[in-house]
Amino acid sequence: MLSELLASREPEIPPETFEIIGRILKARTGFSLDGYKDQCVKRRINIRVRATESPSVEAYSALLTEDPAEQERLLRTLTIHVSHFFRNPSTFDKLAAETLPELLARRSPEPVRILSVGCAAGEEPYGMAILLAERFADQLGRGLFQLRGCDVDQNVLAAARAGLFHPDRLNQVSAERLTRWFTGQGAQYELCGEIRSLVTFYQADLNDEVACPESDLILCRNVLIYFERGRQEAILNRFADALGPGGMLVLGKSETIFGSVRRRFRTVCPVERIYRVL
Ligand SMILES: C[S@@+](CC[C@H](N)C(=O)[O-])C[C@H]1O[C@@H](n2cnc3c(N)ncnc32)[C@H](O)[C@@H]1O
């Protein structure tokens, strides 16, 4: 409701200007607007129109053509990197108590391949790494887990590799965990090398067929909401292919399996949005 109200107050972006902005972005940053919800993208373009004090969206589009720094800023505004460690803590508890033991039993002696898609600055896969180090230290030591994180945005991936976090990314981290796995670095916290070394990051666009390697557990939380239904369905189908029968998928709290993809997944936990491939 609120988003509809906000959208109705936004200045209109004529289709031809919208298309030009999309083309500039694709040509200069490689990022495609294809498949994203139009209203969501337009609202974010308007944020940059206002921030740059452009008199019109056409003037903004001209600025965008000439200014690589603005191209990066628009990309960052569009890709929305809100995240924090142990977002929805009960999901991590459920994974540790049920999903990971099940996958270990099924895969052993091969590693359980975990992929965090749309991983932002690494908060989600690093949270998983901490969980594994705390609850599955023995199996981790025996190489029974493999952890990867991917995102479309190179800047957030660079931040992920640096492993430095502002306290607002850590507000769900207990004092005990903070002391054990982080050290203060000025106004930020540095994640220890032991945990950082457990995650491999790579750049991938969910719109590309190749974005998803074979995996046993995919976490894709708070990413699909930005895509149109048809694109969400295509991505979910690709997840099912990458996981194979028995593989598990975790979505965000406002995301779900729907339409024709329902035939490919069984709901394991509706509250935590955990699904198993049939
Ligand atoms: C709101 S954050 C969610 C982060 C994390 N999954 C969580 O739930 O806390 C969305 C992330 O998805 C990434 N993203 C957006 N579009 C993408 C795409 N086409 N391919 C891969 N990642 C994408 C953004 O760059 C951003 O880091």
Image (spheres, rainbow, N blue to C red):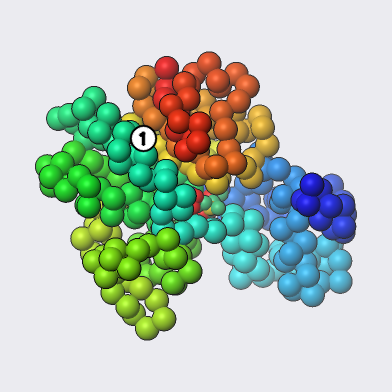
Give the quarter of the image for residue 70.
bottom right
Residue 108 percent coordinates (x, y): 17, 29
Asked if residue 184 is positioned above or below residue 204 in the image, the reply reads: below
Residue at the image position 18 percent from the left and 38 percent from the top: 144
* Residue 7 visible, this orientation: no
Residue 115 percent coordinates (x, y): 37, 41
Q: Nearer the viewer, residue 192 or 78?
A: 192
Instruction: Locate the C terminus by quadrant.
Output: top left
**Label 1 Cα neighbours within 10 Å, binned few <14 / some 14-19 / many ≥20:** many
The number of discs equals 1
Residue at the image position 62 percent from the left and 33 percent from the top: 231
* Residue 66 visible, this orientation: yes
Residue 269 percent coordinates (x, y): 45, 31
Asked if residue 206 is positioned above or below residue 26 in the image, the reply reads: above
As helix, strand or loop, the secondary structure at mark 1 comes to strand
Which amino acid does the dot numbered 1 rest on?
A: Leu
Point out the residue furthest to the bottom here: 186
Residue 84 percent coordinates (x, y): 46, 59
**213 left or right of 49 in image:** left
Residue at the image position 21 percent from the left and 35 percent from the top: 111
Asked if residue 117 is positioned above or below residue 21 in the image, the reply reads: above
Asked if residue 8 is positioned above or below residue 268 in the image, the reply reads: below
**101 left or right of 9 in image:** left
Give the quarter of the image for residue 81.
bottom right
Residue at the image position 66 percent from the left and 29 percent from the top: 230
Residue identified by numbered label 1: 217
